[in-house]
Image: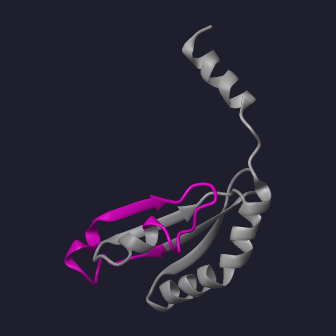
Amino acid sequence: MDDLSRSNASVEQSSPVNTWSICTFFTSDRPMIEQERKKLIESGAQRAKILSSTKQEIDTLFFDRRLSTRDGETLFITSEGNAGFMEIGSFATVSKSSFSVLGYNHPGMM
């Protein structure tokens, strides 16, 4: 058995994810996440949803600082991944800088 087959076999044998605790986290933290999103938008972030070719919505936030700061010509692109939140993740951290930043959340748990 090659390394790839071994790693796939171990994934198939792993225990299922506890979806109840994941859903509980999302439900209990939703007000905080919505509050953080509101703060980002009030501070100048532009929010848009992009529709993919497979009809999935990709949530995005964008700070365009090209004309307002010296560092604004540099664009950071962040992706929170599955079950991540731009409002409290890497996008929120980079958005505090003087760089332009584009964050996206690909479709996932929510």
Q: Quadrant of residue 60 in the image?
A: bottom right
Outermost bottom residue: 42
Q: Is residue 58 above or below residue 39?
A: above
Does 21 appear in magenta?
A: no
Outermost left residue: 70
| Towards the viewer: 104 or 7 | 7
Q: Quadrant of residue 71 in the image?
A: bottom left
Q: Is residue 60 above or below residue 80?
A: below
| Towards the viewer: 11 or 100 | 11
| Image coordinates for residue 37, horizontal then vertical, percent | 56, 82
| Image coordinates for residue 108, horizontal then vertical, percent | 69, 56
Q: Quadrant of residue 10 in the image?
A: top right
The residue shown at (49%, 84%) is: 40
The residue shown at (60%, 74%) is: 48
Quadrant (top left, top right, bottom left, bottom right) of the C terminus:
bottom right
Q: Which residues are magenta?
A: 62-90
| Image coordinates for residue 109, horizontal then vertical, percent | 72, 58
| Towards the viewer: 110 or 25 | 25
Does 73 appear in magenta?
A: yes
Residue 51 shows in this picture: yes
Q: Is residue 7 above or below residue 73?
A: above
The residue shown at (64%, 16%) is: 5
User: Does residue 25 appear to the left or right of 85 in the view shown?
Assistant: right
Residue 110 shows in this picture: no
